[in-house]
Amino acid sequence: MSKISVDKLMDVSETSLLTAGARYLESLKEDGIIQDKKIIDIFNNLDYTVDPSKISKLTQVAIPVRTQILDTQTQTFLDKNPDGVVVNLGCGLDTRFARIDNGHVSWYDLDLPQVMEIRNNFFKETRRYKPIESNVLDLSWMEKIPKNKPTLFIAEGLLMYIPEKDVKALITNIKENFAGSEMLLEAFSPFLANNKKLHKDFRKRETGFNWGIESGKEINNWFEDNVFVDEWFYFDKYRNKWPIHFRIASIIPKMMRVVKIIHLKF
């Protein structure tokens, strides 16, 4: 059987290979932060070799840490809402559905056509699993999501690439169309978003960052009511795994908060 080409992954979509590659490498370790069997299966069937030397030590820790935070919080949502809906925006080569499917959740993975074409080799549409080919900013995808169930939206490795006005419009539309829904999103601080040179993995890529906030509490300023619930900072987790200079820098509160997962409820 011939391996699956990844040539169509360009621009922002190419980052899905970087982040999935970090999960793949971590899952090969006996003491890895995560164990993702599905991502190993995917890379075994892609015409692509993960080069550890091209993934920085920072990224190699950060991606498994964010994966674990999001897995834990998604599981918490499903524990409360076992037959709820999860919508994974800009899913890339994420395999969360395979890891935490409880046999009842309705799951929607959404990304650009070139990404979904590759995903469709590994995830088949079923009654409970639905792939959606769409740009996340083309809000017509919302018409495909049921509005009568508890719903969790996930935006992992996505919103930092989008200008603030579009991030605000996206979150506002989710709030207005899915009352009572929740959202888990990854965010950089402005310092990290505005200094591409700090990201070894992105210095030579055309992909840039466009949005960052110090805390998820700032999103409350976009609305009349409070939507912020909680946030989790990456440098709080697995401190012995981070490169030493990042451990030292993270003693400074502002540096501790440079990358996080934010929980909103509408």
Image (tube, rainbow, N blue to C red):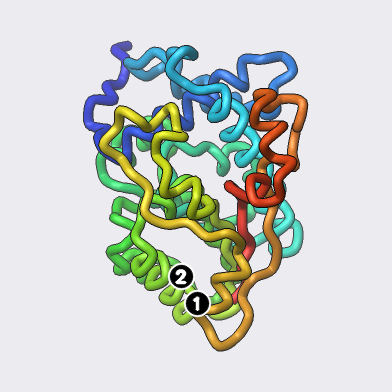
> Picture coordinates of residue 178 (x, y %)?
50, 76
> Picture coordinates of residue 90 (x, y %)?
40, 49
Tell me what residue is drawn at x 67 percent, y 29 percent. Answer: 34
Q: Is residue 32 left or right of residue 189?
A: right
Tell me whether the residue at label 2 lies in contact with that at label 1, contact meaning CB atoms closer than 8 angstroms.
yes
Labelled disc at residue 200: none
Q: Which residue is mark 2?
A: 171
Determine the secondary structure under disc 1.
Answer: helix
Q: Which residue is mark 1?
A: 175
- Where does the C terminus fall, quadrant-wise? bottom right
Q: Is residue 179 above or below residue 196?
A: below
> Picture coordinates of residue 2 (x, y %)?
29, 12
Tell me what residue is drawn at x 59 percent, y 34 percent. Answer: 62
Kind of residue at badge 2: Ile
Residue 130 seen by the camera: no
Kind of residue at badge 1: Lys
Looking at this view, name the residue that lies furthest to the bottom: 224
Q: CA distance from mark 2 to mark 1?
A: 6 Å
Q: Is residue 91 above or below residue 57?
A: below
- Where does the N terminus fall, quadrant-wise? top left
> Picture coordinates of residue 150 (x, y %)?
61, 70
Q: Is residue 83 above or below residue 177?
A: above
